[in-house]
Amino acid sequence: MMTELLQDQIEYYRARAPEYDEWFYRHGRYDQGEEHTRQWQWEVQQVRDQLRSASGFGRILEMAPGTGIWTAVLIQIGARVTALDASPEMIKINRAKLLSDKVDYQLTDLFSYAPQRQYDMVFFGFWLSHVPAERLSPFLDMVQRSLKPGGRLFFVDSGKVDRSRSHTGTANLGGEMQRRVLKDGRQFDVVKIYYDPAELTAALRRHGFDIEVKATENFFIYADGLKSS
Ligand SMILES: C[S@@+](CC[C@H](N)C(=O)[O-])C[C@H]1O[C@@H](n2cnc3c(N)ncnc32)[C@H](O)[C@@H]1O
């Protein structure tokens, strides 16, 4: 059951890849007017500025990079980026957009991934909210194993009050499940968890991170910290 759900989640993002950026750039079904877009961009800028506030990393591991929205920043602050995603369609778009010889793409299911080396930094954007609650602990252990002692962990995700969905037909199914609808009407069920920053901070600290999860005014949560042990 769980395996099937995680597979469906991959299928959803494979199918969504060509229209994914409309969400981030507030186009099409996500367009909620100029004021909304301005505020969204301002909050994105706050997160991006924080991400850029440290640089000079040797090797960065990006989990679930998608179309490369954040990979584009990571190649500015690190020498090499290893980008692990389970969707070949996402990887293709990312590669074509960035055209960077600093990025090594690997088609990988993160739920069966075992790190082969330790990185100076690990990043994931809008990924943690898709990790089922029962997998959070093993996932954070895996992140911990992927980082060198003192390495940097940074992530960004949807805020607890998600005002970002717009006219997309997304339905909350109860618990951690949502039904998503693509532009052509195809429907997929995915995990989507809106974390409380304080609760997530406590979970991360229990897993050996010196970190605090913060929230922007409306849309995002993000965290910038270190592997502490
Ligand atoms: C919400 S998107 C985030 C993309 C990008 N990080 C961003 O912030 O724009 C989720 C990404 O997770 C990938 N994904 C879904 N299930 C996965 C899995 N089991 N292993 C690796 N990647 C997965 C999808 O292909 C997609 O690129």
Image: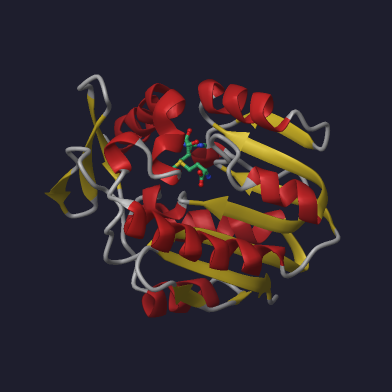
Answer left or right for 41 relative to 116. Answer: left
Task: Place residue 187 in its image quadrant.
Answer: top left
Residue drawn at the location 69% of the way across and 30% of the way down = 105
The spot of residue 39 in percent (x, y) is: 40, 63
In the image, residue 217 sits, relative to residue 181, either above or below, namely below
Residue drawn at the location 46% of the way across and 49% of the way down = 127
The spot of residue 162 in percent (x, y) is: 28, 59
Residue drawn at the location 44% of the way across and 67% of the way down = 221
In the image, residue 157 sits, relative to residue 166, either above or below, namely below
Question: What quarter of the picture does the N terminus occupy?
Answer: top left
Question: What quarter of the picture does the C terminus occupy?
Answer: bottom right
Give the colouring mode of the picture. Answer: secondary structure
Closer to us: 133 or 184: 184
The spot of residue 120 in percent (x, y) is: 78, 59
Answer left or right for 37 relative to 167. Answer: right
Closer to us: 94 or 36: 36
Residue drawn at the location 68% of the way across and 77% of the way down = 228
Asked if residue 10 shows in the view, the reply is no
The spot of residue 76 in percent (x, y) is: 78, 51
How many tags in the picture? 0
Asked if residue 41 shows in the view, the reply is yes
